Image: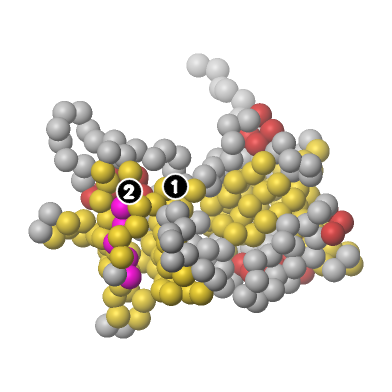
Amino acid sequence: MFRTFAVPCAVALWGLALTAAAGDKKPTLADDLKALQGLWQSPVQADKKNVRLLVMGDRGGYTVKRGDDLFNFTALLPARHKEENGKRFFEIEVAKDTVYRVDYRFEKGALTVTVAGGDYKVDRVNTRAPDSPEAKKLVGTWKITGGTVGGKEVPPKELGLAELVFTEDRYAFKDAKGKEMLNAFFRVDPKAKPPEMDWYGLKPDFVLPLVYELEGDVLQIAQPQLKKQEQAKRPADLKSGAVLYRAERVKTEKKEEKGR
């Protein structure tokens, strides 16, 4: 069921370069935080070791893997941005009296992070919907009107969410009371057959592969079966998804301009 995904799951502002103010003014920590937003990944090294770093708002998390083995990990948690002795870093408090530190530096537009005793050059993972008319049609608020679980029709309240909101690179789930349950990054490929969508969770290495169909103001999204310790496989079509969501666009009424 969807609830098992939305609650425990825990991924950007598009653009790689860190831009400073005019002149030689040094970027502030606030500038750094803005530039760090998103999901970052290092190339797999000779020992099959790689890093994924997720920064969303004032929260951060990372995974360090060697092959399929998890070497070091922290989920998305509040991060304190600091600078000492010319070095910039953020600290993630994973438990009382337990703090993990992630050093970073921008060099010629590239980002290097020091985590778990190693230096890693990381590149931004594209978590933004492509700049195409089809992708832009998703932007807005969608009311869940029904769906299926295991092929059986279920009412909206049993799907675990009431609204789905898309911006250019984020999606958000809201419950029946309007409370935001999850807010993370997403990307789409509207040219695939069927069109594909990826939802990032609140873990740096979690991506939920989906397929969708958009016809006018009606949106359908098929979610795969979630299995522990296995990467979910993208459904072949809407009918083969473990969970199917149907939604209708919430239209906003335009206020008439009052005469002067």
Say which of 117 and 250 sits in front.
117
Asked whether disc 1 touches disc 2, contact meaning CB atoms under 8 Å apart, the reply is yes
Q: Does the magenta stretch include residue 22?
A: no
- Most extreme residue toward the front is 46
Q: In this view, does 121 lie above or below 201?
A: above
Q: Does the magenta stretch include residue 115?
A: yes
Numbered marks: total: 2
- Most extreme residue toward the right is 152
Please rate how many residues cluster around mark 1, counting C-alpha atoms within 10 Å: few if below 14, some from 14 to 19, many from 20. Answer: many
Give SS at disc 2: strand
In the image, what residue type sits under mark 2?
Leu
Where residue 114 sits in the image (x, y, percent)? 29, 62
- Specify the quadrant of the image occupied by residue 167: top right
Inspect this view and state whether residue 1 appears: yes
- Coloring scheme used: secondary structure
Where residue 169 sits in the image (x, y, percent)? 54, 44
- Specify the quadrant of the image occupied by residue 149: bottom right
- Residue at the image position 65 percent from the left and 66 percent from the top: 231
Say which of 192 and 143 sits in front.
192
Which mark, residue 111?
2
Mark 1 or mark 2: whose residue is earlier in sequence: 2
In the image, what residue type sits under mark 1?
Arg
- Residue at the image position 17 percent from the left and 56 percent from the top: 87
Inspect this view and state whether residue 63 appears: no
Which mark, residue 145?
none
- Specify the quadrant of the image occupied by residue 73: bottom left
Q: In this view, does 250 lie above or below 79?
A: above
Residue corresponding to mark 1 = 124
Where residue 45 sits in the image (x, y, percent)? 43, 59
Instruction: Provide the residue span drawn in magenta.
Output: 111-116
